[in-house]
Image (spheres, rainbow, N blue to C red):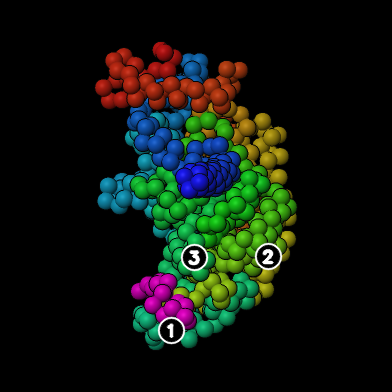
Amino acid sequence: MACNTVRAGAVYEESTITAIGYVLAGLALAFLLRKAYVRLQLSLAKHRSLAGHSRMSRRFASWVPFYEYGESAFFGVDSAPDHIVAARRAGFMRLAALFANRFQKTVAETAELTGQVSDLEFTSRYRVPFQFSGYVRRHLKTGSFVQSSGGVMLTDLDGNRFYDLTGSYGVNVFGYDFYKDCIERGSERVRDLGPVLGAYHPVTAHNVRRLLEISGLDEVSFHMSGTEAVMQAVRLARYHTQRTHLVRFCGAYHGWWGDVQPGVGNPLPARETYTLKDMDPAALKVLRTRRDIACVLVNPLQALHPNAGAPGDSTLLDSARKAHFDRNAYAQWLAELRAVCTERGIALIFDEVFLGFRLGLRGAQEYFGVRADMVTYGKTVAGGLPVGVVCGKHELMRRFRDDRPADICFARGTFNSHPYVMGAMYEFLAKLDSEPVRALYRNLDDTWNERAQRLNDRLAAAKLPVRVANLSTIWTLYYPQASGYNWMLQYYLRAAGLALSWVGTGRLIFSLNFTEDDFTAVADRIVSAATEMQRDGWWWIDAQLTNKAIKRRVLKEMIQARWASGSAISPMGSISSPRSK
């Protein structure tokens, strides 16, 4: 009897252990399935391009070999007939002679400094696709120095005057004379204090009140750049939510620090960043299912080209560049994003370093009708001097905890709230209330949308394969016809008297003070430059010339440059003739 009891107990114990094992296995399986589901949602929320996959893009960038086109291939990489190649060569050399003569002093000064200033060395190398860059830099030299500015014009060291479409990287919203006045008056206002740091000049109090009124938020912190402002906003969001990850959208730029630049350009992987598809429901699913997201960063400029990086001519090897702005669609997307962030306790951060004050007095929040938890400003808000600003809700801006005094969120900077920066900012914010500035904001979208349409109508009437897309005063040129030479247009535009930034036709930035006469002069120059480029044969048409064909050719060249030897590639890595393959 006792033996049976022991045996029954053993069986019961074994059954219990087995049951517990099944329960634990079930729990483990449920955990793994949940983890797999969440991971699948994250994968589905990534954009299919390389920009949406940071690790893959970094690996691909490290794989891409250097090669360049020799002279015989440079003008006929698309297998154009001989008379087109000859026309291109003649046009190129004509431009080269014009640049050498017209921009002599400016080019000489730039050349002398290029090997000594790393920024200049970088930008000069990446104005065009790397396969063409060496030949262009040897023969078609450009300058990076300007002597003066006035109205909407820049003057270089040779006395040449250009209509400014650089926008000073977005700083120039109201025209250079506006900023000169801000700096001059602001400097005079704080002159008695001078460069005293740590303490505040009294104008700072006015600036704080005005920024809170504009942003509709509770607190302000000052920094020295837009990159720093975004860094601080993300750090504060992580501190207060006690979560690790930030979300950025594919293609968006938020400065050059590691966590917001997870792909090419950052030597280290960003391990606490999710890059999701912009304007896509799959991204909202990730926000609803993950528990580690502290904040979502939004750069409203992406509304012009969702899921694509800032368009630059250095990657313009075909005509795949696209841009289109739909204000209502983007406003609806931001409203959905706002609702999910509120539901999940995620901080919604508008990065208005670039767009702030360009769309309207109260920026993207007012323009799209959506409120953010934090907003970053920079560029223009200090009246032309360097600055970064974070505005946010009280509960997100505090850098300490009352109940845990040793647990702080540190952020300081030697030059934060510099008196001269605060002085120029005071003048800038005061001018926003003036009638001349308010007049510039009236009917802003209608004015610039009509100008873009007018230019597109002229380009279409002239049968030129180039169009413009715009978000207010920020424009992108795109190309509806397949070509491997669209990047050449930037040089025809410079020859026509238009100042472009180093990214070329990817970003044209107008200041709001462009009059109708100013714009007509710019439009005339764009049409004439494009006409001349077409006449020189760069936009030759062939049924076999498609964007897909161009991509295949370039990939084939890369593979050959990576692995082949002998006749395909010269000892200098220069491809001599695509028609010989």
Type of the residue with mark 3: Gln
Q: Main secondary structure of the magenta part?
A: loop
Q: Is residue 365 visible?
A: no
- Dot 1: what SS? loop
Residue bounds of the magenta highlight: 400-416
| Residue identifier under label 2 | 366
Provide residue 263's location: percent of width, then percent of height. Answer: 44, 45
89 to the left or right of 479:
left
Residue 403 is inside the magenta segment: yes
Circle 1 Cα neighbour tier, 10 Å, few/some/many (<14 / 14–19 / ≥20): some
User: Which residue reaches farthest front?
Assistant: 1
**Picture quarter containing residue 137?**
top left
- Which residue lies most toward the top here? 580
The residue lying at 63 percent from left, 39 percent from top is 467
Q: Which residue is mark 1?
A: 200
Amino acid at pointer 2: Glu
Q: Is residue 302 above or below residue 177?
A: above
In the picture of the structure, the residue carrying the numbered disc 3 is 242
Under mark 1, the amino acid is Tyr
Q: Residues within 10 Å of mark 2 (few under 14, many from 20)?
A: some
Q: Nearer the viewer, residue 290 or 16?
A: 16
Query: Does label 2 or label 1 sit earlier along the sequence?
Result: 1
